[in-house]
Image (cartoon, rainbow, N blue to C red):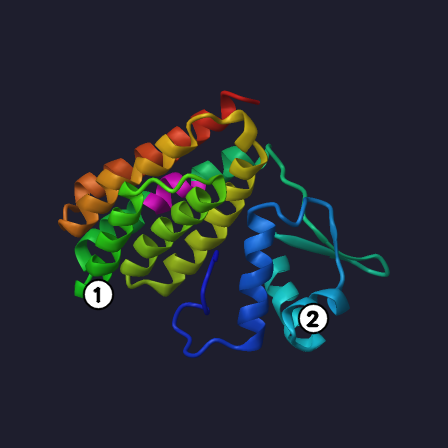
């Protein structure tokens, strides 16, 4: 999944569950850009009422994953390649910061989780969907280890938008596995508490992502 309950909150609500389910499909483009979203159909699929779905849609709209038009309805946002430069400008500042803070602040539980992700990375999941979700899980584990809920939620939002661009070009990006496996040294730097190395690797990863996309557009 793309996200759990909001940082700093406790038990997940129905709106949180609806958000996670829809966000996962929107980010991985299983809900295609421009596709309409029907409150009643989504509520029936998720087995909940319309109120949690509407709350989730408001959150998704704030995160630029859906857009609502009066008298027309709610639609998945288009993936704008022109946004790549803007996203990269933000991520080049915040991803290295998050990696460095995670290296400095990660607790025993964080390091256990990061080591578990390293093991999953070594197993090389064969499917594209598995790799994409592993990539998102790796990022979110680092964000959580920063112990900064504002930075965490901000980076999840931008990572979601960047992942949508990535998914749009999956069939033209042959280096998906290599891109995901770049996280190995980054995770190791965070686990080892090497903030400067983690910062440099995170910056290189974001720059490499933008370069990969630009090579096929």
| Residue at x 45% of width, y 26% of height | 212
Residue 110 at least partly seen: yes
- Using a 10 Å C-alpha cutoff, classify the residue at mark 1 as few (fewer than 14 neighbours), some (14 to 19) or many (20 or more): few
The circle on residue 193 is: none
Q: Which residue is mark 1?
A: 109
**Residue toward you, 145 or 137:** 137
149 part of magenta stretch: no
User: Which of the 4 quarters of the picture holds residue 184?
Assistant: top left
| Residue at x 55% of width, y 29% of height | 171
| Residue at x 45% of width, y 65% of height | 4
Residue 26 lies, with reference to residue 90, above or below; the image says below
Q: Report whether 19 appears left or right of 41.
A: left
Q: Which residue is mark 2?
A: 43
**CA separation, marks 2 and 1?**
35 Å
Residue 9 position within the rendered picture, expressed as x and y whole percent measured from the top left? 42, 75
Magenta region: 90-95
Q: Report whether 49 appears left or right of 21.
A: right
Residue 167 position within the rendered picture, expressed as x and y whole percent measured from the top left? 54, 38
The first of marks 2 and 1 along the sequence is 2
**Helix or strand or loop: what does disc 2 sit on?**
helix
**Main SS class of the magenta portion in the image:** helix
Report the number of discs: 2
């Amino acid at each position: 999944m793309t996200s759990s309950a909001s940082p700093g909150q406790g038990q997940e609500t129905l709106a949180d569950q609806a958000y996670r389910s829809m966000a996962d499909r929107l980010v991985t483009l299983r809900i295609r850009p421009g596709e309409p979203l029907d409150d009643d159909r989504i509520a029936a699929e998720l087995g909940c009422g319309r109120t949690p779905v509407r709350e989730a849609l408001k959150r998704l709209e704030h995160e630029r994953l859906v857009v609502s038009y009066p008298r027309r309805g709610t639609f998945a946002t288009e993936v704008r390649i022109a946004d790549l430069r803007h996203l990269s400008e933000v991520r080049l500042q915040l991803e290295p910061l998050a990696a460095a803070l995670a290296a400095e602040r990660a607790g025993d539980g964080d390091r256990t989780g990061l080591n578990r992700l390293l093991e999953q990375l070594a197993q090389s999941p064969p499917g594209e969907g598995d790799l994409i979700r592993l990539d998102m899980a790796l990022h979110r584990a680092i964000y959580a280890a920063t112990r900064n809920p504002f930075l965490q939620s901000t980076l999840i939002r931008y990572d979601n938008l960047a992942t949508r661009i990535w998914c749009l070009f999956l069939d033209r990006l042959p280096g998906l596995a290599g891109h995901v496996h770049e996280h190995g040294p980054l995770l190791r730097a965070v686990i080892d508490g090497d903030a400067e190395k983690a910062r440099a690797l995170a910056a290189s990863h974001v720059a490499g992502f933008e370069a990969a996309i630009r090579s096929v557009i």
